[in-house]
Image (spheres, rainbow, N blue to C red):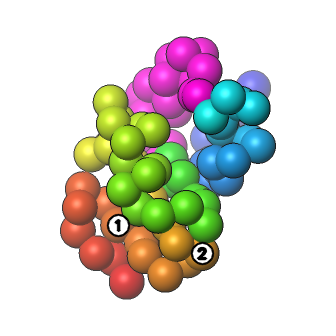
Amino acid sequence: MDLSKVKLVVSDMDGTLLNSKGEISDLFFGLFHKLKKQNIHFCAASGRQFNSIIYKLAPIKDAIFIIAENGGIAKKKMKYLF
């Protein structure tokens, strides 16, 4: 698959990234590292509170963008983007 034009992947949390038990598949983290090697950014987007997203994605929290609280917060590495 040619991903040369892909720069960013954005995923919702509930019902998309998280399963029905509120867990993230270990397969996701392997996929995340493949995206990173191709210089493709990842963004978790959700109506959830920021800290809830950080808790679920703790192993990669400093390497991703997060849009939380229905778009009210956008951060990367704990730095506000807007």
**The disc label shown at residue 75, or none:** 1
Label 1, label 2: how far apart the Cα atoms are: 13 Å
Number of the front mark, 1 or 2: 2
Q: Observer-nearest residue: 4 or 18?
A: 18
Asked if 27 appears above or below 18 in the picture, the reply is: above
Q: Is residue 55 above or below residue 24?
A: below
* Residue ID at (32%, 30%): 59
Figure check: 9 above or below 38: below
Instruction: Characterize the magenta stretch by its predominant secondary structure.
Output: helix
Q: Which amino acid does the dot numbered 2 rest on?
A: Asn
Q: Which mark is residue 70?
A: 2
Disc 2 crowd rating (10 Å Cα; few below 14, some 14-19, many 20+) is few
The quadrant where residue 48 appears:
bottom right
Residue 14 drawn in magenta: no
Which residue is found at the position 23% from the left and 61% from the top?
78
Seen from the viewer's position, the closer of residues 20 and 68 is 20
Residue 45 x, y percent position in the rendering = 58, 59
Q: Is residue 52 left or right of residue 9?
A: left
The C terminus: image quadrant: bottom left
Comparing 3 with 80, the one in front is 80
| Res. 4 in view | yes
The amino acid beneath tag 1 is: Lys
- 50 relative to 30 in the view: left or right: left
Q: Position of residue 53 (x, y in %)?
A: 45, 50
At x 54%, y 52%, the residue is: 44
First to last magenta residue range? 23-41
Q: Position of residue 36 (x, y in %)?
A: 43, 34
